Amino acid sequence: PISLYCDEAAVAHPTRSYEVTIHPTRSSE
């Protein structure tokens, strides 16, 4: 499921995907 979210996050915020990798909990924001 993480990969799926990362994909959607990358589409919405390419730069956000990088933050998500560093801060998984940040995905909530």
Image (spheres, rainbow, N blue to C red):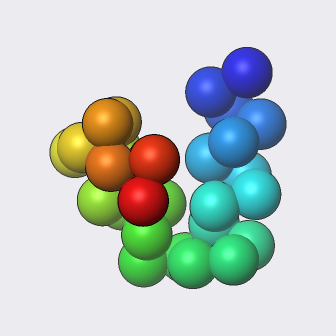
The spot of residue 1 in percent (x, y) is 73, 21
Residue found at the far left of this picture? 22
| Quadrant for the C terminus in the image | bottom left
Residue found at the far top of this picture? 1
The spot of residue 2 in percent (x, y) is 62, 27
15 or 24: nearer the viewer: 24
Q: Residue at image x 69%, y 42%?
A: 5
Q: Quadrant of residue 21?
A: top left
Q: Is residue 7 above or below residue 16?
A: above
Q: Residue at image x 32%, y 49%?
A: 26
Q: Residue at image x 30%, y 59%?
A: 19
Q: Residue at image x 62%, y 47%?
A: 6
Q: Is residue 6 above or below residue 19?
A: above
Residue found at the far front of this picture? 29
Q: Is residue 14 above or below residue 23?
A: below
Total numbered labels placed on residues in the image: 0
Q: Quadrant of residue 18?
A: bottom left
3 or 26: nearer the viewer: 26
Q: Is residue 11 above or below residue 17?
A: below
25 or 8: nearer the viewer: 25
